[in-house]
Each structure stands twice: as structure tokens, then as C-alpha cells.
Image (cartoon, helix red, strand yellow):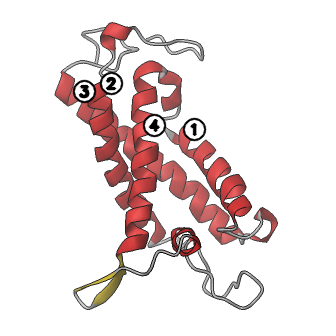
Amino acid sequence: MKAGFTYITEPSRRRVGLSVILGIIVGIIGAIAKWGWEVPFPPRNPDVFWPVDAMSRVTPPKIFLDMFGVSDWTVHFSGYALPMDVFIVHVLFSIVFGLMYCVIAEYWPRIKMWQGCVFGFFVFIIAHNMVMPWMGLVPPVSEIPFDEQFSELFGHLWWLWIMEIARRDLRNRITNEPDPEFPLGSR
């Protein structure tokens, strides 16, 4: 296996078109896995208020949509009101990162380090500790409760790990060959 930090795969072994399709599929799978993670480890504490005007914390996708004046789009299913607008943003976020991850993996295998968890860690750091506080979607990092940081950090590791397992399995089954950094005939 060739997988140093500077190693780029051979063009003949890349399946870029397939990686785009897989990025969409694993993005959806990842979004559902992240939701599942948040059941036992809810990322936002309902008793913590931010901003200081006593407005209860809502999800970052909801705040993002409110910034653009997108009105609520709620669908009722089995007696529950489901915020479809927030769900769509959540799934699109996952698809965008799934696409990036899958396409980059065809060229630069190191992105898959620790079965995607390193990429998930950097998404967490950049998105949740830099971009989202800067945009005002979450409090400053110093004000984010430990429970939220814990849930988001390990939720992102879980999210990417699940996406990598799905990406690799689907790619290998569809192409009947290993990832591009492995010799043909290996599994």
C-alpha cells in the first residue's frame, strides 16, 4: 500500500464519477448517523441560554436559515412536527462534506486516515470552533458547554467513520477492486 502524506494515486485507478455518486449516498447516510448520535448525546443543553437576551438556544442550521429570512417549513408525521428546512440544511451539509471527502479520497488517500476520523476532527475544529462562532451560529468557544463540545467532537468522528465505512464498502463492491492506493488483487 502506498499512502504517505505526499502520495497521489495513479489516474488510471481513480473512479471520480463514482466518488461523486458515493459522496451523495454517504452524505445522506452520515447525516442520519449524526442524528442518531445526538439521541444519546444531545449537543445543546436546553437550560443554557445564548445569546444573553434569554433566547433559548436553537440549532445552528435554524439560526443560519433565520439569517436569510427563510421561513419555517414544518411537516407533520406520526404526530410530530418536523422542521424540514433544518433537516435539509443538515443533510446538505453532510452531502457537501461527503462529496469533498469521497472525491479527495480518490486522489489523496491520507484523507482517510483513521478511517476518516481525522477528517471528521478537522471538520469539527474548523466548522464548530472557528466558522460557526465567527458567523454567530453558536456562542464563542469559551462559552460553549463541555457537553456540547463532547457531543459535537465525537459526533463528527462517528459521522466520518460511518461515511468511510459506507464509501469503502460501496466503492469496492461496485468496482470489484480495492481503493486506488492498494495493489489490484488485494482486499
Residue at 44% x, 73% y is 39
Residue at 49% x, 13% y is 8
* Dot 4 amino acid type: Met
* Dot 2 amino acid type: Val
Which label sits on residue 118?
1
- Which sits earlier in the primary sequence, circle 1 or circle 4? 4
Indicate whether 175 appears above or below 137: above
C-alpha gap between disc 1 and disc 4: 14 Å
C-alpha gap between disc 1 and disc 3: 22 Å
Which label sits on residue 100?
4
- Which sits earlier in the primary sequence, circle 2 or circle 3? 2
Question: Residue at label 3?
Answer: 172
- Which quarter shows the C terminus? top left
- Which sits earlier in the primary sequence, circle 1 or circle 2? 2
Q: Is residue 77 visible?
A: yes
Q: Position of residue 128 (x, y in %)?
A: 64, 57
Q: Which dot, 1 or 2, sits closer to the camera?
A: 2
Q: Nearer the viewer, residue 86 or 129?
A: 86
Dot 2 falls on a residue whose secondary structure is helix
Dot 1 falls on a residue whose secondary structure is helix
Question: Residue at label 2?
Answer: 16
* Dot 1 amino acid type: Val
Label total for image:
4
Other residues around mark 2 within 10 Å, as few (<14) / some (14–19) / many (≥20): some
Judged left or right of residue 138, residue 92 is left
Residue at 57% x, 79% y is 58
- Write down the quadrant of residue 186 in the picture: top left
Other residues around mark 3 within 10 Å, as few (<14) / some (14–19) / many (≥20): some
Dot 4 falls on a residue whose secondary structure is helix
